[in-house]
């Protein structure tokens, strides 16, 4: 009986093509090596391959640069106090519009504390339909105090940028959500006395923070330049007065910068008096208080001239 399976001395590629599955034994080592190489590459480049390049949908608020606008000061007009107890339809409508623009995002359109921004707030915004648990209380005078000063610990912003009459209009609309305590005359009088509602409010000029920073830096850089120049003058001067200043000064930089920063020091007697009170704070040694009037006059004149 002949054996069906004979060991072939040579590979018959024509037979392999007829039965391709037999090729697997030849290509398997190559596949294994390829998988190992790919695996090593993947592990070594895992950070780069899995990096999420998807742009963030929420804008980082810390990157938004917003400054206060330039404003000229003036006077907010006086409030008609009769509107508090007897509001006109126009006054009530204005209060509704102001509430919608300034309060509804947190407190909700109907004052339920369910505005769009309330989800991310802790504690949650006030529900104006519930009169219990108010920090300042739901009376008229306390509501005005809240709008004027805010409640920082609760995340309640102050609305001092609105006119007093606009704040009163907002209070009138908020009071329409529930049965609030009756407004009594004493509350109106005390609020008027505290915030000068019937007299008008004087508003100071306002400049952007960036502009204020530039002005401060400009002023300080000028003072620093003068101070550095004055120190060089004293260091290279061999006169008796310069030597005396070097002897009694504990910190020349502080001596010159403190003089430059205080316009009142242009009065010699005032300057001597202040140095005598706090010699160390103004850059001198404690024994400077022992100088005679003549010596003080010489040293004061020298400090003044060195800076100019």
Image (cartoon, rainbow, N blue to C red):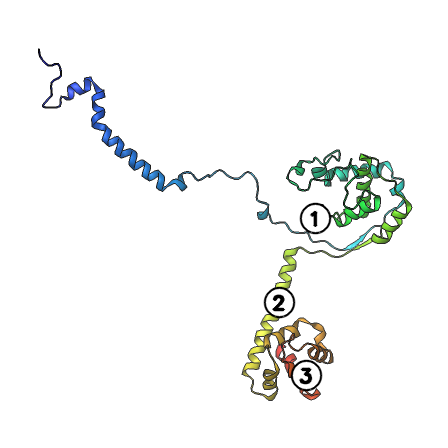
Quarter of the view holding residue 262 = bottom right
The Cα atoms of the two marked residues, 3 and 2, are separated by 29 Å
Q: Secondary structure at mark 2?
A: helix
- Name the one closer to the observer, 201 or 124: 124
Q: Residue at x 61, y 83 (%)?
A: 248
How far across and down, in percent of the image, does residue 267 sit?
A: 73, 78
Q: Is residue 136 above or below residue 212?
A: above
Camera-near label (3 vs 1) is 1
The Cα atoms of the two marked residues, 3 and 1, are separated by 49 Å
Q: Is residue 100 above or below residue 256?
A: above
- CB of mark 3 within 8 Å of CB of mark 2? no
Query: What crowding class fits label 1: few (fewer than 14 Cα within 10 Å), some (14-19), or many (20 or more)?
Result: few
Camera-near label (3 vs 2) is 3
- Which residue is most to the front? 1
How far across and down, in percent of the image, does residue 158 sit?
A: 74, 48
Q: Secondary structure at mark 3?
A: helix
Q: Quadrant of the C terminus?
A: bottom right
Q: Residue at x 63, y 66 (%)?
A: 219
Q: Is residue 156 left or right of residue 234?
A: right
Q: Is residue 164 above or below residue 39?
A: below
Q: Earlier in the sequence, mark 3 or mark 1?
A: 1
Q: Is residue 126 visible?
A: yes
How far across and down, in percent of the image, does residue 166 sit?
A: 80, 44
Q: Earlier in the sequence, mark 3 or mark 2?
A: 2
Query: What crowding class fits label 2: few (fewer than 14 Cα within 10 Å), some (14-19), or many (20 or more)?
Result: some
Q: Which residue is mark 1?
A: 153
Q: Is residue 301 visible?
A: no
Q: Is residue 40 left or right of residue 255?
A: left
Q: Which residue is mark 2?
A: 220
Q: Which residue is mark 3?
A: 289
Q: Is residue 271 left or right of residue 228?
A: right
């Amino acid at each position: 009986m002949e054996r069906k399976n004979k060991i072939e001395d040579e590979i018959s590629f024509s037979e392999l093509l007829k039965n391709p599955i037999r090729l697997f034994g030849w290509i398997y080592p190559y596949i294994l090596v390829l998988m190992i190489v790919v695996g090593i590459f993947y592990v070594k480049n895992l950070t780069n391959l899995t990096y999420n390049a998807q742009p963030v949908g929420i804008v980082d608020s810390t990157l938004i640069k917003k400054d206060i606008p330039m404003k000229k000061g003036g006077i907010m007009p006086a409030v008609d106090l009769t509107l508090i107890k007897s509001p006109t339809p126009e006054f009530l409508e204005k209060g509704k519009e102001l509430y919608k623009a300034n309060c509804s995002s947190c407190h909700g359109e109907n004052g339920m504390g369910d505005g769009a921004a309330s989800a991310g707030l802790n504690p949650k915004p006030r529900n104006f339909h519930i009169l219990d648990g108010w920090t300042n209380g739901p009376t008229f005078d306390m509501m005005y105090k809240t709008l004027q000063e805010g409640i920082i610990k609760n995340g309640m912003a102050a609305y001092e940028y609105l006119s007093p009459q606009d704040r009163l209009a907002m209070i009138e609309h908020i009071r329409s959500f529930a049965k609030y305590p009756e407004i009594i005359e004493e509350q109106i009088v005390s609020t008027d006395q505290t915030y000068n509602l019937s007299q008008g409010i004087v508003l100071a000029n306002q400049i952007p923070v960036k502009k204020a920073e530039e002005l401060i830096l400009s002023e300080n850089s000028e003072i620093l330049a003068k101070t550095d120049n004055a120190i060089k003058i004293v260091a290279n001067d061999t006169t008796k007065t310069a030597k005396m200043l070097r002897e009694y000064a504990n910190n020349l930089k502080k001596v010159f910068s403190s003089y430059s920063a205080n316009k009142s020091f242009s009065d010699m007697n005032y300057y001597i008096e202040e140095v005598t009170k706090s010699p160390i704070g103004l850059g001198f040694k404690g024994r400077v208080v022992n100088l005679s009037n003549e010596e003080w006059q010489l040293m004061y004149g020298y400090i003044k001239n060195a800076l100019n």
